[in-house]
Image (cartoon, rainbow, N blue to C red):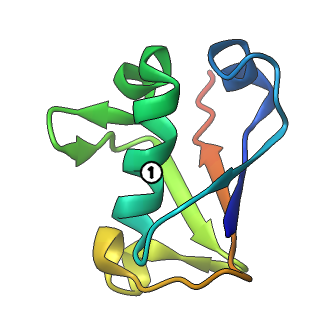
Amino acid sequence: MASIKIPTPLRQYTGNNAEITVSGATVGEALNDLTTRYPALRPHLYDGDQLRNFVNVFVGDEDIRFLYELDTPIDDSTKLRIIPAIAGG
């Protein structure tokens, strides 16, 4: 099964798990599996059915926005990372 690395600020919504094994054939299905198991995480990742603008998801070193977005195919060996954008001033 694929896995998703959870950034420290979001771990409070996943029972403090740093990495979670998920099922799915696409990034969207994997994220759906994740947010189904951890529903408190969903509003931090999604605005309706779309990923929030400040949430970046990577398959390996590739940003899914430059691939097929949520339709990006994955397999059992895929390592996903959620990286929230950080703003400051």
> Left or right: 73 with respect to 12?
left
Q: Position of residue 15 (x, y in %)?
A: 75, 16
Q: Which SS class for mark 1?
A: helix
> Left or right: 19 with respect to 71?
right
Relative to 57, say whether 9 is above or below. above
Relative to 89, say whether 86 is above or below. below
Point 32% across, 68% down: residue: 70
The quadrant of the image that shows the N terminus is: bottom right
Q: Amino acid at mark 1?
A: Leu
Nearest the camera: 36 or 8?
Answer: 36
Point 75% across, 36% down: residue: 7
Point 74% across, 83% down: residue: 77
Nearest the camera: 18 or 21?
Answer: 21
Point 58% across, 85% down: residue: 75
Number of labelled discs?
1
Image-quadrant location for residue 88: top right
The quadrant of the image that shows the C terminus is: top right
> Left or right: 8 with respect to 88?
right
Q: Position of residue 72 (x, y in %)?
A: 39, 82
Relative to 31, say whether 66 is above or below. below
Q: Position of residue 11 (x, y in %)?
A: 74, 23
Mark 1 sits on what residue?
Answer: 31
Nearest the camera: 18 or 8?
Answer: 18
Q: Is disc 1 surrounded by few (<14), some (14 to 19) or many (20+) residues within 10 Å?
A: many
